[in-house]
Amino acid sequence: MPDNTPAPQVSPNNPCPFLRALVANGYVDGHVVPLGTLTKEIGLAGGKTGVKLVTAKLATFVVAMIANGHPLRSVTSGAVLDELRYGPLDKHGAGSRILTVDAQVDEDQIKRFADFGRDYANPDGGTERGLNAQEIKTFMAENLKRDGDNARWSYPIMMQGEWPVLLEILGKGEGEARYLSVAEVRTLFVDRRFPKRITDRLQAP
Ligand code: HEM
C-alpha cells in the first residue's frame, strides 16, 4: 500500500539525501548530532559487521568531523546537520544537482541520473532501472565535467563518500549486477524515506 503521509520537513541547509532521510524519520536530530550517534546510525544502515563496520564508522566519523569546518567543535559537541550547506563538503553544483540550493527536487535531474543507467534484474522480481558501480562512476565524472572550471581537485575524493557509498548501502544484487534503483533514489530524495530493508536495520526512532 502506498504511504501517503507527507514527507517530514528537513532544513534546506542539509543537502545530503541520506542524512535528510535519517532526520526526516527521526533517527537523528536535525540540528546538532553527536558523532557517536551519527556513526552508529549510519553503521546500522549499512548492515555491515566486524572490520567492515569499524572501517565504515571511521570513514563516517572523519566526514562528519570536517563537515562544518570546525573539527574540534564537531568532535566535542557534534555535527550541525542544518549548517552543512556552503560548508567544506558542499561542491557548489558539481554533484548531481538533484537537490537545488533551497533543497527542492529537480525532476529533470532525476531523469538525467536515470539516463546513465539501464534495466537490471530486480532480486525481488521483474526488472527495474538502475545504475551499477561503473555507471555511477561515469555519472560522477560527467557531473564534474558539467561544472567545468569550478570543480576543485578535492571533489572527486569527496564524491567517493556519496554515490558509491549509497550503492553499497542501498544497492540490490551482487557484483557487477549490483545496482542503485532509480525508483529508490527518487523516494530517498523526494519523500526522504528508506526502503523497509534499511529501516529494519535502524533503531526505532
Ligand atoms: C553513509 C553515509 C552517507 C551517504 C550514503 C551519503 C550520500 C550522499 C549522496 C548520494 C549525496 C548527493 C551527491 C549529489 O547530489 O551528487 C550526498 C551529498 C552530501 N552529503 Fe552525504 N552521505 C553520507 C553521509 C554524510 C555525512 C556523515 C555528512 C556530513 C556530516 C554528509 C554530508 C553531505 C553533504 C554536505 C552533501 C552535499 C554535497 C554537495 O552538494 O556537493 N553526508 N551524500
Image (cartoon, rainbow, N blue to C red):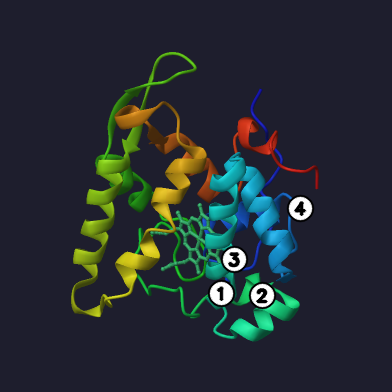
Distance between mark 3 and mark 1 Cα atoms: 15 Å
- Disc 1 on helix, strand or loop? loop
Residue 80, labelled with which disc?
Answer: 2
Q: Nearer the viewer, residue 191 or 16?
A: 16
- Per the rendering, the mark at residue 26 is 4
Q: Please indicate whether residue 2 sits to the left or right of residue 147 in the image.
A: right
Amino acid type of the residue tagged 3 in the rendering: Phe
Instruction: Name the residue: 77% across, 43% down.
Output: 203
The local secondary structure at tag 4 comes to loop
- Crowdedness near tag 1: few (<14), some (14–19) or many (≥20) residues, C-alpha within 10 Å: many
Name of the residue lying farthest toward the front: 51
Q: Which three-letter amino acid code belongs to the residue tagged 4?
A: Gly
How far apart marks 4 and 2 lie (CA) works out to 15 Å
Residue at left offset 26%, top offset 42%? 135
Residue under pointer 3: 61
From the viewer's perspective, tell me whether residue 145 is left or right of residue 25: left
Give the x, y percent position of residue 96. 35, 58
